[in-house]
Image (cartoon, coloured by chain):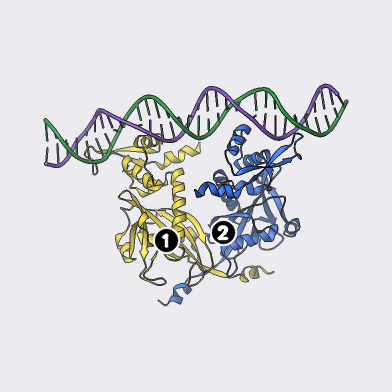
Chain colours: A blue, B yellow, C purple, D green
Amino acid sequence: MAPQAYYSIHPKFHAAVDCIIFGFEEGELSLLLLQRNFEPAKGQWSLMGGFVEEGESLDDAARRVCAELTGLSDLYMRQVHTYGDPGRDPGERVLSTAYYALVDIKKYDHALVKAHNAHWVKLNEIPHLIFDHDRMVQDALRFMRYQAGVKPVGINLLPEEFTLTQLQTLYEAIQGEAIDKRNFRKRIAAMDYIEKTGGIDKTSSRKGAALYRFNQDKYDGNFKI
Amino acid sequence: MAPQAYYSIHPKFHAAVDCIIFGFEEGELSLLLLQRNFEPAKGQWSLMGGFVEEGESLDDAARRVCAELTGLSDLYMRQVHTYGDPGRDPGERVLSTAYYALVDIKKYDHALVKAHNAHWVKLNEIPHLIFDHDRMVQDALRFMRYQAGVKPVGINLLPEEFTLTQLQTLYEAIQGEAIDKRNFRKRIAAMDYIEKTGGIDKTSSRKGAALYRFNQDKYDGNFKI
DNA sequence: GCAAAAAAGTGTTGCATTTACACTTTCAAT
DNA sequence: ATTGAAAGTGTAAATGCAACACTTTTTTGC
């Protein structure tokens, strides 16, 4: 068989990425969802997605798609799964790879979000989404929760400086259950890569709460020995 | 934009699946690898792979590809990751989704394996593989190890009936470290879904070892309450 | 200026899980 | 009858995890 024929006898498919974009506000996780003002499935809710272009890796496509909506191009993102059932997109056949992304909800570009008719929706208020996007959300949520239990990825949902109460509330939202304050702080204290900045936050407490930051170098150091 | 145009302005890609096929023999994990007697990359080592066809889901494609090589179509399989860098396949652009599969190494079709010029290779003797297949193997191994630590998926590498010594040797191979025999048996005893068959295996011991089997119903029951 | 409110911050104990550890039993082969 | 080879079995120490309540600080309202 000639090398060319090896490939050309096989079909080609559209490839897309869909992004499950997590934010954290008011003690709850939210997703950034589109109320589609475009076809297909105009009027329905969906994830932000887009087609993979020539010469663009899947990771790059996911990054571009998230940046188109949020204006942020340095988000923490991870591939979740690829969905390839024929008929999953009722228009044409499309293979779609889902990525989750973590956003500091204070930072996104409001104009872009508005232009896409996108909205932050709390996890327990998520409407039915088009195609197989419901399942993508379930899978992404499970994977993100798993990763958050293993690595401090959740920090990407907070500003650079944060209080321990914010951090605890975040992890309670991720895990979906209350955490004992003293045990939580003991655990954090044992992580030398979460360090005091010296700053004090007085926005949510009369007394004032110490600010902390994540130190990537110290974190990497823990594994390089 | 007309619905058709929505899709057609975007490029299409070949879609492939590559299978990381695990077996267990002589106390070690092995992979079923091809010494390619076909183009591209003839003469080199690779994973078993194939293109996704029209009307075929990714899962179905992976199942078909594994069955083409092993003759077994009911393998435990899980999607690992999709690799989409441009240039990952030097011929044409191909998006490839990796699946791992677990095989009872006593059962595969030897003629098919021979026809494909495939060989079982022990984990620590794996040669360099083409394209990004080395990375696929690393990712699949990590994912399989994780899953084996959480669910009894490893059982798919053993015959229906197995001794506790076999099971322990398997888990030592998966984890890559020795396990205390009494602690291991205590843990297994606590799993009511691993049950004695009443049979006795005398092939590897004068005394004879009790045979066990995995009870899927009891296992499912543990989570349905 | 005093009292109340609201969040930050701080250790100890009991319980459960995990780990370490060595000898006996059985049976086939010689 | 002895030997060899793998199967099978329980306890004690240590570690990790979960439960639990009060003090401190500062602002605000009286």
- Residue B195 occupies which quadrant of the picture? top left
Q: Position of residue B138 (x, y in %)?
A: 45, 56
Is residue B170 shown left or right of residue B50? left
Residue drawn 65% across the image and 70% down it: B5
| Residue nearest the observer in this picture, A152 or B27 | A152
Residue drawn 68% across the image and 69% down it: B2
Q: Position of residue A187 (x, y in %)?
A: 58, 37
| Mark 2, secondary structure of its residue | strand
Does any portion of residue A132 appear in the rendered image? no
Q: Position of residue A81 (x, y in %)?
A: 54, 55
Q: What is the chain identity of the residue bearing mark 2?
A: A
How packed mark 2 is, by other alpha carbons closer than 10 Å (few <14, some 14-19, many 20 or more), is: many
| Spatial CA span between label 1 and label 2 | 21 Å
| Residue nearest the observer in this picture, A151 or B55 | A151
Q: What residue is pinned by disc 1? A: B64
What quarter of the picture does the N terminus of chain A occupy?
bottom left
Q: What residue is pinned by disc 2? A: A97
* Dots 1, 2 in contact, CB < 8 A: no
Q: What is the chain identity of the residue bearing mark 1?
A: B
Q: Position of residue A10 (x, y in %)?
A: 48, 71
Asked if badge 1 and badge 2 are on a common chain, one would say no
Q: Amino acid at mark 1?
A: Arg
Residue drawn 75% across the image and 38% down it: A204
Q: Which mark is residue A107?
A: none
| Mark 1, secondary structure of its residue | helix
Q: Nearer the viewer, mark 1 or mark 2?
A: 2
Is residue A80 shown left or right of residue A122? left
| Residue nearest the observer in this picture, A218 or B203 | A218
- Residue C3 occupies which quadrant of the picture? top right
Q: Amino acid at mark 2?
A: Thr
> Relative to B214, is A82 above or below?
below
